[in-house]
């Protein structure tokens, strides 16, 4: 019995808890991508850099707050910085829309042109971010490190294995839950939210009904930038902030959005967790887990790891390809992507 | 002078005119039907009346007021409402949300109007929590008409409301359209099912190559031997 408990603790500690946190970060990222796609009908490749930009602003505000001695210990100061970072990122994204995307919208350019334009925006933003904060790692996590540490857990339960839950993981989950709840309330219950769904559903009829396209576009960008800032900051808090990581994150984020069905908010959330858990469970080394469950003579010699962690992006890529082959419109979408 | 009058419309897409001096009218409580062969410019005439096509000459007046230069959304605020032929509902939204979106420009309480539409189309009340995209073709058309009625329009324009529905559903839809007209709304519609549509029409317009070929009451057009031979298949 104790062995089974130990096995469960091991897998919770090393796979389920990190997977939940990572999944929430992907879900928030994918939501931003999917909202822009639903309204503006293009895949925004600059979204990863928007997350990075938001996280960067959060770091600057955090540093400023720290230097003034402001603290909300045991919570990280970055949470306090988040609203300012969101504001800055929203303004920046709206500026990009004004000077870049609006031009192509008025020209009624093809979807593919928008995608290429967003890649351009991505490179410009990536350069700008490296120019401002530099390419190296930034650690900005402060406050209590653990809600419960492995040692505490061991003394508390008497088990051999420890379960460590980081403060950032709890914050990630809680923030993601709040954001998702607020977003769905907005989309389902408010007049503006409904008009956004109507516009995403049928642009021409929405215009005929008097829904202002410009306003819908503005709100879509605002929500997307806010979600990106939150996702980027949470990711940076949980791991550390590295500017180059966000370009790599684009793949799992797009995979999440596409698996769920591009343009579907529920799909983006479910997709985020699917990709996160697939990555974690396929790259997890099961040796210790099995060690508690199997008789000694059955113990495998290797790590029982299906794929090295270096290849975790391949998992997202394979899921993406399989989705496009088998169910291109995704899990929660009736229209083809 | 009719309540809605679109007179001498000439225009088209790009350089080629599709409409040539085309005139259609509808009065309150009346059903005006535009029929004609494929490519006669029926849908184009509708779009022109609603401001979705730029006219080179001609004028559209609503209750004596010139709306020729107004954008479609402005015409909606003036009391015109349009049901496109295809893609005329919000498929992922519920029936009730579709109706709410129809009243997007209204700031007053819309529950009364929603109630009236449920009285007119009882099936919509049953299905009000269902996404419009999951309904049958005929029910979806009812949602589309209901959405257009949410602005309490004085003119309702329908582009082939019975396209792709069964004959039974078509009769049912025509009955509802008569009900709508009886509430004092002017109805202008384009129809493929010319005979049945002319039977309920107070005015009929037969268009051919973008011109008014025959204009008369629905009854008289049905009785006209030339119209029967040329446009109604005998």
Image (cartoon, coloured by chain):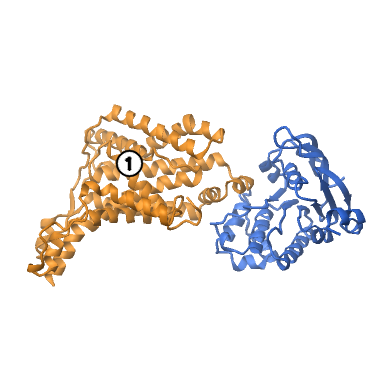
Chain colours: A orange, B blue
Decide if residue B65 is on the left or right side of residue A2: right
The image shows residue A152 at horizontal and vertical percentages of: 12, 58
Q: Residue at left 56%, top 32%?
A: A107
Mark 1, Cα crowd under 10 Å, few <14 / some 14-19 / many 20+, is many
Q: From this viewpoint, which residue is outermost toward the bottom?
A: A1
Residue A319 at least partly seen = yes
Name the side, left or right, on which A164 lies relative to A236.
left
x then y, percent, for residue A157: 12, 65
| A103 left or right of A64 in image | right
Q: Nearer the viewer, residue B40 or B121?
A: B40
Tally the marks: 1
Image spot of residue A60 (x, y percent): 28, 33
Image quarter of residue A68: top left
In the picture, residue B184 is in which quadrant?
A: bottom right
Is the N terminus of chain B in the top left, top right, bottom left or bottom right quadrant?
top right
Can you identify the residue that label 1 sits on?
A: A82
Indicate left or right for B12 with A81 as reference: right
- Res A178 visible: no
In the image, what residue occupies the spot 24% across and 56% down? A282
Q: Quadrant of the C terminus of chain B?
A: bottom right
Residue situated furthest left in the rendering: A297
**Subunit of label 1:** A
Q: Which one is nearer the viewer's eye here, A172 or B143?
A: B143
- Where residue B113 appears, x then y in whole percent? 67, 58
Foreground residue, B167 or B157?
A: B167
Determine whether A276 is above or below A106 in the image.
Answer: below
Nearer to the camera, B218 or B100: B218
Q: Quadrant of residue B114?
A: bottom right
Q: Secondary structure at mark 1?
A: helix
């Amino acid at each position: 019995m104790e062995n089974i408990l130990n096995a469960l603790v091991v897998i919770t500690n090393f796979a389920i808890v990190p997977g939940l946190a990572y999944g929430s970060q992907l879900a928030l990222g994918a939501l931003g991508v999917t909202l822009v796609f639903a309204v503006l009908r293009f895949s925004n490749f600059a979204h990863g850099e928007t997350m990075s930009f938001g996280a960067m602003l959060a770091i600057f505000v955090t540093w400023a707050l720290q230097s003034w001695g402001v603290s909300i210990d045991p919570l990280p100061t970055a949470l306090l910085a988040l609203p300012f970072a969101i504001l800055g990122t929203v303004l920046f994204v709206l500026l990009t829309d004004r000077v870049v995307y609006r031009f192509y919208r008025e020209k009624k350019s093809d979807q593919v042109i928008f995608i290429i334009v967003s890649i351009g925006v991505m490179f410009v933003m990536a350069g700008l971010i490296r120019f401002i904060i530099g390419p190296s790692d930034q650690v900005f996590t402060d406050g209590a490190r653990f809600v419960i540490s492995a040692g505490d857990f061991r003394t508390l339960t008497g088990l051999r294995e420890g379960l460590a839950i980081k403060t950032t993981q709890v914050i990630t989950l809680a923030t993601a839950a709040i954001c998702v709840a607020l977003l769905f309330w907005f989309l389902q219950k408010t007049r503006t939210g409904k008009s956004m769904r109507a516009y995403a559903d049928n642009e021409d009829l929405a215009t005929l009904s008097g829904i202002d396209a410009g306003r819908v576009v503005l709100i879509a960008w605002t929500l997307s930038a806010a979600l990106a800032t939150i996702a980027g900051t949470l990711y940076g808090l949980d791991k550390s902030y590295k500017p180059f990581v966000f370009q790599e994150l684009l793949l799992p984020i797009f995979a999440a959005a596409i698996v769920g069905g591009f343009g579907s908010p529920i799909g983006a959330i479910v997709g985020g967790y699917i990709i996160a858990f697939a990555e974690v469970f396929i790259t997890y080394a099961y040796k210790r887990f099995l060690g508690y469950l199997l008789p000694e003579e059955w113990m495998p010699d290797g790590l029982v790891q299906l794929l090295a962690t270096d290849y975790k992006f391949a998992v997202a890529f394979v899921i993406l390809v399989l989705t496009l082959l088998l169910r291109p419109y995704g899990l929660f979408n009736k229209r083809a992507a | 002078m009719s309540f809605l009058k679109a007179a001498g419309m000439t225009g088209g897409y790009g350089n080629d005119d599709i409409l040539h001096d085309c005139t259609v009218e509808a009065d309150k409580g009346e059903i005006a039907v535009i029929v004609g062969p494929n490519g006669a410019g029926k849908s184009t005439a509708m779009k022109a009346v609603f401001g979705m096509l730029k006219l080179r000459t001609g004028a559209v007046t609503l209750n004596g007021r010139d709306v020729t230069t107004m954008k479609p959304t402005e015409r909606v605020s003036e009391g015109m409402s349009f049901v496109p032929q295809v893609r005329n509902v919000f498929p992922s939204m519920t029936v009730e949300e579709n109706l709410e979106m129809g009243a997007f420009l209204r700031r007053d309480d819309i529950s009364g109007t929603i109630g009236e539409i449920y009285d007119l189309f009882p099936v919509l009340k049953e299905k009000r929590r269902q996404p419009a995209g999951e309904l049958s073709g005929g029910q979806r058309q009812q949602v589309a008409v209901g959405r257009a009625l949410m602005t309490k329009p004085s003119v309702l324009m329908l582009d082939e409301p019975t396209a792709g529905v069964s004959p039974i559903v078509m009769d049912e839809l025509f009955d509802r359209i008569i009900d709508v007209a009886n509430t004092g709304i002017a109805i202008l519609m384009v129809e493929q099912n010319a005979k049945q549509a002319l039977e309920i029409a107070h005015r009929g317009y037969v268009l051919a190559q973008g011109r008014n070929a025959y204009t008369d009451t629905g009854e008289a057009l049905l009785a006209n031997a030339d119209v029967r031979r040329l446009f109604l298949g005998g």
